[in-house]
Amino acid sequence: MDDKLGGSDLRLVLIAAAKTECIRYKRTFKECGYPCAVTGLPLEVALGVDAAQNLAAAVRKCDAVLIDFEGVPPGEAPRLIGVVGSLGTPVVGLLPADNCDLIYACLEAGLDGYVVKGVDRDCLRLVPAVLMWAIDRQRDAQARNHVVDALRHKERQWSAMLNACLSLITYHDAEGRIIWSNAGETDADNRRIDPLFGTLNDEIWRPEDEAKGECPVPRAIRTGEPHEDVVVSVDGSRMLQRAFPVVGDDGRTVGAIASTLDTSALAPAEEAIKIAVRAQASATVAGGIAHKLNDLMAGVAANVDLVLQEVGDRPEASALLNEIEDAALSAGRLSDHLLAFARGGKYVPKILDLNDSVAEAVQIQARNCPDEIRIESRLDGGLWKIEANPAQMSLLAAQLLANAIEAIRGAGCVTVATVNETVAGTDGERRPWLEPGRYAVLEIADDGCGMPNEIRAKMFEPFFSTKGRGRGLGLAGAYGVVHGHGGHIAVDSASGKGTRVTVYLPAVDADEASRGAIGSGAPRSPVEAPAGQGEVVLVIDDEDIVRHAVARFLTRRGYLVLKAADGDEALRVCARFEDKIHLALLDMIMPGRDGMEIFRELRESRPGMAIVVMSGYDRGTYERALLEAGARAFLQKPVPMDVLAAAVRTAIDRQAAEETAGATGVAGGKAIE
């Protein structure tokens, strides 16, 4: 009875007691214009021990199941209908007219369709029509379910997006009542509970400007146009409300959608953004000043070295020149402060304990601190290590501590503490400016005069001071150091309530940081480099004083020197000069084209030429990329002439050694202090 007979559009599984029923029904369907393939399944198999598996195998690829319930016990009929129906296939029954109990049991079990068998065999001609009706009905139901599922999915998406909004989103009817808001929640029974449902807009908000008479929501409903205004809630919070009319099919306004944002919560963030923007603008200016100052001091230092060689036997002249050199070095230290403020990178970072820098600053300030001011230290002995420049960390701690001491009039106390802190992603609302991670935290608090808001807004600006005569960059330098190390500085202060400055510096694992640091380790002390042997050096610098002084110095050291005032001129010199150019001394910041672009073109035009880079800007901006691209060394201006001579000699010798050995790659360079 499990033979598959015939074949055409309709695929039918027949469950019946007699095998001859398959041929009979197939012939009847064909006569009615419904040719089909009928697969028979014995009734004893459908009701047997493995009925579920047998039915699943038979029904897997059919369009409908026809069950002849002749001889099926009334108690077994519902189970058979339930098993077949669970497979997702329409079930049509042939019910005997003389068994009312069986008919009732089958109808209650949920047949998709049925035909009552009578004495007249023509009743079987109704079966194809009932089968097709059941199949179409199921397909319609599946299509409806698909549409409903898609709509529910879209509703969940829109709900999630609206619930993620910082603003309160409300949907109002034509009377201004709230009929939906993203303040609502869904309970365990999937029912939405909205505390604002049914509330009039005017029961919650009123216009800040009473003269306007109404809030944006009723105004949008009345005028049919979008409106925006500041409103005040019943609890006194100041909010920005935007309302947009909802228009029906007939063109009339049927309601409004409103977005209401509590602007009082954004005030601290807006103030922080303003401070950051001002600091960034000042940092850009400071970086430019530092670059120019370093260029000038590089020229001064080079010329001083040249003159010292001429007057070495005249002590008085040498002493005056040494004073000039000291002044140039002082100016260089000032440029370091400017670069620190300009978020000037970490220079040569090391793995260090912040406690060391803090303890040193406390020790120095304690000697100069008035007797009536106490300094209390609470340093965490297990403080996480950080990757930072030691000099800049000392500058940071000393500057913050000095500010705290100067804020106290008379007797008082300054508390210095360090602690480990892990910032989780859930801290975003409380401290949105901090990325999740591990931080070594420095906190310096004083019980001094504090700062009003208008002073606190300017405290990170360069050269701003409340002391009459400012001492330079001050907290602006501290701001640059912290942000240059990927950290954050926060200030909590009010008039008469003291000030608390908290510095967050990213903690690192010593092993990882030591692998990633550039040029880590102690700075190399320069030694007297051998003189040149007629090698050709191209000096590229837009500052005349630097270019001429370096050229004179290298000429005296035995090199043949070519000069160029910018990158384009340097490329022209390389194209015209027929002999070998052993080394190019390249300033990265010049008018015209970008220094990295000139660097790449020099490498292409003269592959065998070593390149040593100089810059008055911070090392972190270019150093890693240049050394990885093949630069032999990076020199930070102002650079002592003995260090310059050593760098030039080393770069030329290494280039020659690699060419002699037939090296195919260019070894990376190293940073030189």
Image (cartoon, helix red, strand yellow):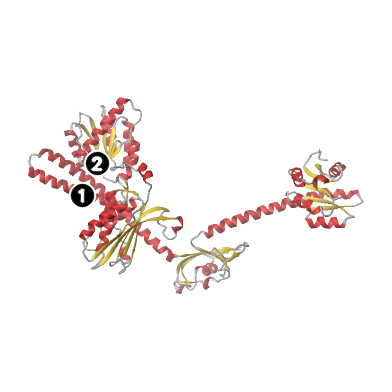
Determine the residue positioned at 32% across, 62% down: 500
Mark 2 crowd level (few <14, some 14–19, many ≥20, 10 Å Cα): many
The extreme right residue here reads 119
Residue 467 percent location from the top left of the image: 23, 63
Determine the residue positioned at 59% across, 55% down: 154
Q: Gap in Å between the C-alphas at discs 1 and 2? A: 20 Å
Determine the residue positioned at 85% across, 55% down: 102
Residue 296: in sight, yes or no?
yes
Relative to 209, does residue 586 appear above or below in the rendering?
above
Q: Which residue is mark 2?
A: 542
User: Which numbered dot is residue 622?
Assistant: none
Q: What amino acid type should be assigned to the residue bearing mark 1?
A: Ala
Seen in the image, is 17 located left or right of residue 577?
right
Seen in the image, is 70 located left or right of residue 633?
right
Relative to 669, does residue 202 appear above or below in the rendering?
below
User: Which numbered dot is residue 331?
Assistant: 1
Q: Secondary structure at mark 1?
A: helix
Please state which of residues 41 and 112 is positioned toward the viewer in this rendering.
41
Q: What amino acid type should be assigned to the residue bearing mark 2?
A: Asp
Residue 652 percent location from the top left of the image: 26, 31
Residue 79 percent location from the top left of the image: 78, 52
Relative to 626, does residue 478 appear above or below in the rendering?
below
Mark 1 crowd level (few <14, some 14–19, many ≥20, 10 Å Cα): some
